Amino acid sequence: LVPAALRGLDYVGTVAFAASGTMVAGHAGMDILGCTMVGTITSLGGGTIRDLLLGRTPVFWFKEIEYLLLCVGTALMAFYAHDKLEGPVAEEALWWGDTLGIGAFSVVGAQAAASVGMGPLVVPIC
């Protein structure tokens, strides 16, 4: 149950980060390609850097393609539905998604560092 819940929260964070990155890019005037790239990089960038620094290649989203698909799908939806993603209810939902995602990303990062033998001072940083 715990691994499934963690995976679910990881997906929630992935979607929230992709949506928020896409919306920021859209407000900056980017087109659909730019918004999709910014949303995807916002969502997957931290884990990609973590994996590269830990020597874990290929990076996680090469092996678990669902993360990339979630990002691209979310970015496309956020781009086309941006007017519906604004307002207090949407902002609250994104805030909770970001919050839960950060927690999940922290646990997943610590597990990744521990799995390659990093010490107790490095594990919390990842």
Image (cartoon, grey):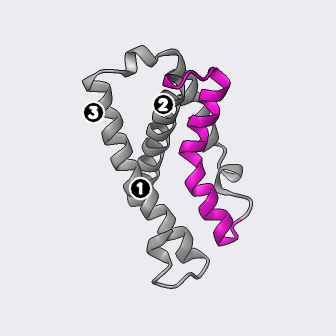
Start-end of magenta stretch: 27-56
- CA gap, disc 3 and disc 1: 18 Å
- Closer to viewer: mark 3 or mark 2: 2
**Residue 82: image location, x then y, percent:** 45, 18
User: Which residue reaches farthest front?
Assistant: 28
Image disc number at residue 21 = none
Verify whether residue 7 appears in magenta: no
Near-viewer residue (4 or 116): 116
Mark 3 touching mark 2, by CB under 8 A? no
Kind of residue at disc 1: Ala
Q: Which residue is at 69% across, 67% downward?
A: 56
Q: Name the residue that disc number 1 marks.
A: 104
* Residue in the foreground of this view, choosing between 64 and 103: 103
Residue 40, position in %: x, y? 60, 39
Q: Which mark is residue 92?
A: 3
Residue for point 60% across, 43% down: 41
The residue under label 2 is: 24
Asked whether the residues under the numbered discs 2 and 1 touch, taking CB atoms below 8 Å apart as contact, a structural biologist would say: no
* Residue at position x 29%, y 21% in the image: 87
| Real-space CA distance between mark 2 and mark 1, rounded to the nearest whole angstrom | 23 Å
- The amino acid at mark 2 is Val
Say above or below: 83 vs 49.
above
N-terminal of the pair, mark 2 or mark 1, is 2
Query: Label 3 sits on what residue type?
Result: Glu
- Give residue 51's position: percent from left, percent from top: 64, 63
Tag nearer the camera, 3 or 1: 3
